[in-house]
């Protein structure tokens, strides 16, 4: 089979692997429009969908630039008809309820990383985890396979980290406060974070408001020489690279199966050389985990999987019944985090950040067991957390002198006001998330929501309950439509009903 020259175009089609060929190549190789082809280059292979362009006369294979760069910028490629890989058979077996061994799971994950599996086949693997589930051994196998198909960093010193399973709007700002609080005590905490999957802001999205979060491995080691803590996105480091591919498909499905969530978190941490890990599980109505009983079950699973992989684990169950703080969305949360580091900020942000930082300080032996939170509060109040954060921002290429008011938020704003006098009886996580995402978060950094009230607050008719921000008027209108349907905040007066209804 001849090798064909590559033509690169700059069309943005998202992260879809597509090759465009003339009818002459399609006939020569035996390809049809919409079918899959094996694309071979420099001793490697991936899978792509085929598009046939009848207007093309030259025998070249046209590839979008991102795909071309991802496969190493080859000058020529070979095309071959697609053959169903063994990994697809394993995915089908999992869909039927079979427990998979390490070699079977490794084959699936390697094919994900190598681009052999299409998004549809990856979606089937995610669906299998969602519907059938995995046992502890399968989760260990999945995590290990995700680590082994990427690179692993060794920092030559004890490495600590913390990670929240999320599910509560406003949660991304907590690490912005907690990580520098730990680093201020010279405990090494190189935090890799994900971008948002189903939330309005991931920690990496919020940190990116302050500084660069995308670094190569050598740059990361240089960061470690400059500061005891940093917050970066793991997607550019080739750490458990299957994770970012799986997350992209999960995002499209709005799915986050338990086994994949655990493997995603633990594989990134192990790849970063983490030996000591704190997991935060928010618990409450409309959080990912709605009861303490379920929280304890999940804590047990995390601990078993983590210990099975050699990690020293601690799990914290935290309150997740309403948003953390008042701001939701990258820029709005960045403002609130910085306000907290400067000595202000909402009590819920201070309480959660110092509680988690305190547990890490206990794990590191810096604070006695049971005294970590008090130690963390002292560090935050003294200004040491803020100074550590300034060092982090500077090391990551940002402006360490930035003030909360310097952070731009959405240019367009709308208010939702109280329809009556009364008390706030509910602030709903899912509704707030839907509104913030409809406004454009997290892709629009300035989009999101700013709460003015929490559960239990007294309000008067006309008081502002919630502000919505966006850099798009169309998006803002869409967010208002969503808000009118989902009831993000409920208010009740003291008088609920009267009988009889008519006199």
Image: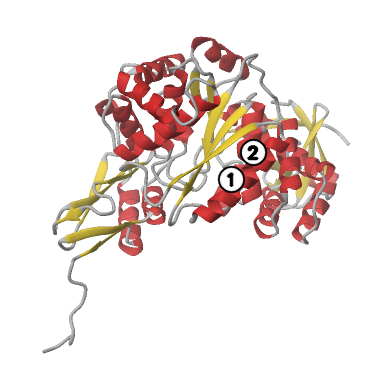
Residue 393 left/right relative to 196: left
Residue 49, relative to residue 389: is it above or below? below
Q: Residues within 10 Å of mark 2 (few under 14, many from 20)?
A: many
> What percent of the width, then of the height, locates residue 61?
72, 36
Q: In the rendered image, which quarter contains the C terminus? A: bottom left
Taking the spot 78% from the left edge, 62% from the top edge, the residue there is: 96
> What percent of the width, then of the height, locates residue 438?
39, 51
Taking the spot 55% from the left edge, 28% from the top edge, the residue there is: 161
Residue 137 left/right relative to 252: right
Of residue 491 and residue 449, the one placed in the foreground of this image is: 491
Residue 3 found in image quarter: top right
The residue to which callout 2 is attached is 243
Of residue 364 and residue 435, the one placed in the foreground of this image is: 364
The residue to which callout 1 is attached is 299
Instruction: Find residue 128 and name its label.
Output: none
SS at mark 2 in the image: helix
């Amino acid at each position: 089979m001849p090798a064909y020259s590559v033509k690169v175009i700059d069309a943005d089609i998202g992260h879809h692997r597509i090759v465009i060929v003339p009818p002459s190549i399609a006939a020569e190789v035996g390809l049809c429009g919409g079918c899959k082809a094996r694309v071979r280059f420099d001793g490697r292979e991936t899978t792509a969908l085929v598009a046939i362009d009848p207007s093309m006369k030259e025998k070249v294979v046209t590839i979008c630039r991102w795909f071309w760069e991802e496969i190493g910028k080859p000058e020529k490629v070979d095309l071959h008809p697609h053959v169903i890989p063994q990994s697809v058979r394993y995915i089908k077996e999992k869909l039927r309820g079979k427990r998979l061994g390490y070699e079977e799971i490794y084959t699936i994950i390697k094919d994900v990383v190598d681009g052999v599996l299409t998004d549809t086949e990856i979606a089937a693997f995610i669906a299998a985890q969602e519907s059938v589930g995995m046992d502890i051994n399968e989760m260990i196998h999945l995590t290990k396979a995700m680590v082994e198909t990427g690179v692993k960093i060794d920092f030559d010193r004890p490495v600590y980290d913390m990670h929240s399973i999320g599910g509560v709007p406003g949660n991304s700002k907590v690490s912005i406060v907690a990580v520098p609080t730990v680093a201020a005590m010279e405990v090494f905490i190189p935090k890799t974070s994900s971008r948002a999957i189903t939330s309005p802001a991931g920690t990496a999205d919020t940190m990116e408001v302050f500084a660069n979060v995308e670094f190569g491995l050598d740059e990361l080691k240089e960061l470690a020489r400059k500061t005891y803590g940093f917050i970066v996105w793991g997607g550019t480091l080739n750490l458990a690279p299957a994770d970012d591919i799986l997350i992209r498909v999960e995002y499209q499905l709005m799915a986050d199966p338990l086994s994949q969530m655990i493997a995603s978190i633990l594989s990134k941490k192990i790849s970063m050389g983490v030996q000591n890990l704190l997991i935060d599980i928010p618990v409450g109505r409309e959080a990912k985990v709605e009861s303490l009983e379920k929280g304890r079950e999940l804590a047990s699973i995390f601990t078993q999987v983590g210990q099975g992989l050699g990690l020293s684990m601690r799990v914290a169950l935290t309150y997740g019944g309403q948003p953390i703080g008042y701001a939701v969305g990258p820029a709005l949360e960045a403002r609130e985090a910085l306000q907290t580091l400067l000595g202000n900020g909402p009590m819920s942000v201070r309480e959660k950040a110092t509680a988690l930082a305190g547990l890490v300080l206990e794990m590191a032996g810096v604070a006695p067991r049971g005294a970590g939170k008090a130690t963390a509060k002292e560090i935050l109040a003294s200004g040491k957390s803020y100074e550590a954060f300034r060092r982090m921002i500077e090391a990551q290429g940002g402006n360490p002198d930035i003030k909360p008011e310097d952070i731009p938020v959405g240019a367009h704003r709308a208010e939702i006001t109280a329809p009556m006098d009364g008390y706030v009886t509910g602030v709903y996580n899912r509704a707030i998330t839907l509104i913030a995402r409809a406004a454009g978060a997290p892709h629009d950094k300035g989009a999101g929501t700013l709460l003015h009230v929490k559960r239990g607050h007294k309000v008067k008719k006309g008081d502002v309950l919630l502000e919505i921000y966006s850099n798009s008027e169309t998006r803002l209108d869409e967010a208002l439509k969503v808000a009118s349907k989902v009831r993000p905040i409920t208010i009740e007066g003291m008088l609920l009903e009267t009988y009889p209804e008519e006199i």
